[in-house]
Image (cartoon, coloured by chain):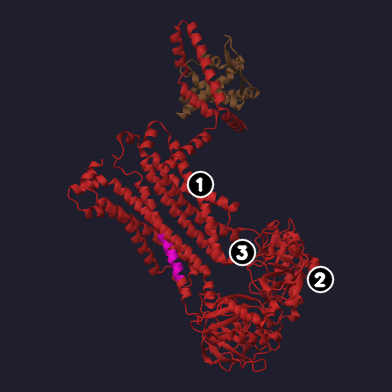
Amino acid sequence: MKEKTDVLQGTLALMVLKTLDVLGSLHGYGIARRIEQISGDLLSVNQGTLYPVLLKLEQEGSIASAWGVSENKRKARFYRLTRAGRKQLRAETRSWEDTAAIIARFFAAKAEDLK
Amino acid sequence: MKTLRRFLTRLSSWAHTQQDDDRLRSEIEDHIAMQTADNIRAGLSPVDARREALLKFGAVEAMKEDYRDQRGMPLMETLILDTRHALRRLRMAPAFTITTILTLALGIGATTSIFTLAHAVLLKSLPVANPAELYRLGKEARCCYWSSYRQDKEISLVSYDQYKYFRDNTKGFTELAAFAAGGALFGARRSGATEAAQSYPGEYVSGNYFAMFGINAYAGRMLTSADDRPSAPPVVVMSYRLWQQKYASDAAMIGSIVNLDDRPFTVVGITPPGFFGDTLRNTPPDFFLPLNAEQSIDGDLNNPSTAWLDLIGRIQPGAQASSIEAEMRVELRQWLLSHWGEMDANERATFADQTLYLLPGGAGITSMREQYEHWLQILMMVSGFVLLIVCANVANLMLVRGMERRRQTSLSIALGARPYRVISQTLTESILLSLFGGAAGLGVAFGCTRLILHFTFASSGVPISASPSIPVLLFALAVSLLTGIAFGVAPAWMATRVDPIEALRGAGRSTARTGSFSRKTLVVLQTAFSLALLTSSGLLTAALYTLEHQDFGFEQDGRLIAKIDPRLSGYKRDQLTPLYQRIRDALAAMPGVSVVAVGFYSPLNGNNWGGSVWMDGRPAPGPKEESSASMDRVTADFFDAVGNPIVSGRGITAQDTATSRHVAVVNQSFARKYFKGEDPIGKHFGRLESRTSRSYEIVGVAKDARYLTTGLAKPIGPLYFLPEAQHDLPETDPGSHFLHDIVIVTRPGVNLSAAQVTQAMAAVDPNLPVILIRPLSEQVTGVFRQQRLIARITSLFGILSLLLAGIGIYGITAYNAGCRTTEIGVRMALGASRSDAVRLILRGALWLIACGLVVGMPLAFAAGRFLGNQLYGVNPFSPSVTLVAVATLGLSALVASLVPALRTSRISPVEALRAE
């Protein structure tokens, strides 16, 4: 059970960073919506899991937050990427792409290629 | 870096819990409100829109929990929570808590107390500056006087001439100091005081002694090199202890005159309070005199062949001790060669074997360490056993407690508690208990150490404090934590092994006796350790008995020993014989006194004097030949006074005067060794040192008696007695004419008090201090004080362990019997008799005891081996001791298990069945 959360949190963190990178400052609900739009059902049931991830990222200094006013004139907490976060995003994107490429090559390899 | 940052953030957010909770709540609300708004826009009714939003958000409480875990310091919070919980639970079971804490206090206290002693004696450095820079000469701590040309194995003591040679030629030392080996007593009297001189320990030290140790004066100044010159005005440094106790910290003491052995010395300073000199010993010096003062008192200073000085030096930072050692070995050869003309044949023959060793000297001269090391190791082992038994007992208690809590634990696990939380709760409880036990144990340790110090070094100034120091406190803490973990782990682990289903089944229905195996193992171990302890204490007690009840060869009853030292009052050699006569006359005139004699040393007074002897008509003994004998010098009637029978010839009598022929009385061992089978009477011998003269004519043989306190387990060695009035020609040994022990024999039924003796002595010479008056029997028992103490402590620990093992066996038998109440009820309803029931319960208990004894036997033998040479000839595998230990333990265990077995058998079957 714990491992599954870790995987989910890992990918979620990357998604949060990317979202903030693309959209700039954004509140929790906005991040959730964005991730939902792009990833489909990953967050469809458990939007709440986003908040512990946000907290962890903030503690690590990858993101920062402040109170602000949303587009609907509601008070909301806005998150934005810090310089460290941008660096982390770059590093993790590269490592993610590397991993994905390796896995992709594995899947692409046919039985006869190995002979 | 990232982790550290997270940690710091967590730490700060832990402090702002409330604020963060508010923030999260409002974020969640905002989130759901926005989602609801979106849902309404999408066409849902407000109620459905909110419902959908909540569903989508997921389990709020689980998320909050997750969030909190991320945010604060869950470990610390849990710890505080667990501690609070454990404290509450302990408060609710006061009987259990108090029993456990007391048991632990005994175990931890015993161990800590022994550690306090071991730390002070074995591990501690001298209280001086940078003890790691200090190096001392010699592997072995030696005492008194040796030859500086030739010493067995290594040169450990040096003469003043040798010291100066080393000091002036060795480069690696910043300071090299010398001081007299072993202690000496001085008769001290403040100038102008009316009271008689009193004796205090003192020490001759080189002028740079205090500079070498880096010790500054508490008041006044310390000695300097300028004080240690032949023509320097006589000065002395006084110990803080004496200054405070005897002179009430009188500031006028500095600069005033104190007469030491009737010579005036000016007190120039007081040592700092913690300083006890170079050696940890019972009688730390109260006076520090310059080496050059020795010339006028004893006169060994300028004799290059008399080695009486220990060396300690402070090496230069960065210098290598090994290269200094090599340098000093070369210097030793050079020095010996420069004295070649004064050396005799034997000394020249062993020239090539002479060497020296330089050892770390931060702990000073460690004679006490060598003396007590094995004893302390034995005590450490014994207290370790007690601690293990205590752990086993407490673990057992904890297990029972765990059983009782089974229902609660299984309920917690059924409700989703994680196993590690259950373990950490139980462990927190046991560690808390052991910490409390440790705190109480410190009190026990303090009392116990005081007691041991009191019995071992009664009335002496041994600088060991019973109050816990930082290392001792750390030790107690570490032992407590380890103990807590040791006895807590098994019960904690057992606690997680419950089946959640059990909670639903209701208490006591289960037949599986979970934890029964580990409980049985604990009881077996306890029995085994207890057996080892009982055997050890039995062996030590047997050894003590053998020692104390041996044939000493002299009488102890109705004899008083009064110690004097005529040297302390400035007596000269030619005044001695009349002095002894006056003392004998004065004391013999007292009513009830039958015989009075004076001797250099009385039996078992702790001294030994001796050297090589040379039989007349035979070649001189070679360097490797065993030719030693101990020597005593006595007045007439000495043999009658100590009750040492003469087996042939005569004793020393009043006819043996300064002018009559030189005679000697030898003991049987001497006769056997040097005159195998021949009649020694009429034969002549002499001391090797006198070389030319072999003038002692043997006039009598005395029965072998124990005079020496060394080699108590060995047969009595050769010993000869010389008349006090006769002086060697040429004089080899003037010091031996200063006799120490007056032996006073009283008639049966007469009780002579110390005050009467002191009074009679004051009439002889008011300036001659009587150092000590005690019965000869007390002098004898004093020799075995250490052995007695160890035997007593071990026996005490043995009884304690017996008690604890008994409680352990009682506990497990009672518990098992309780579990089987129903079964026994059924059996009895079906016709089993009471004795059947008793047998049923006893069988299990006896099996455990038998296992424990079998496991304990090798342990007991190992312990016996470890005691080894402390047993003075008692067989370490003595069957009778082992048998007694096994019987005692078995019997106590039987009684402990019989009580619950009988109680169970008395239960009525109906009641047992209804109890369910």
For chain B, the rendered hue is: red
Contact between labelled residues 2 and 1, with CB atoms less than 8 Å apart: no
Tag 3, which chain? Answer: B
Residues drawn in magenta: B530-543
Query: Disc 3 versus disc 1: distance between alpha carbons?
Result: 31 Å
Residue B697: which numbered mark, if any?
none
Number of marks in the rendered image? 3
Quarter the C terminus of chain B occupies: top left
Establish if B270 lies above or below B259.
Answer: above
> Mark 3 or mark 1, which has the lower sequence index?
1
Q: Look at the image and say whether residue B542 sits in the magenta stretch.
A: yes
Helix, strand or loop at mark 2: loop
Q: Residue at horizontal 44%, vertical 13%?
A: B51
Residue under label 3, please give it. B462
Query: Disc 1 versus disc 2: distance between alpha carbons?
Result: 60 Å
Residue B435: which numbered mark, if any?
1
Q: Residue at horizontal 59%, vertical 52%?
A: B471
Which secondary structure dominates the residues rendered in magenta? helix
Within 10 angstroms of label 1, few (less than 14), some, or many (20 or more) residues?
many
Helix, strand or loop at mark 1: helix
Query: Disc 2 versus disc 3: distance between alpha carbons?
Result: 32 Å
For chain A, the rendered hue is: brown
Residue B633 is drawn in which quadrant?
bottom right
Residue under label 2, please give it. B232
Contact between labelled residues 1 and 3, with CB atoms less than 8 Å apart: no
Mark 3 belongs to which amino acid? Val
Tag 2, which chain? Answer: B
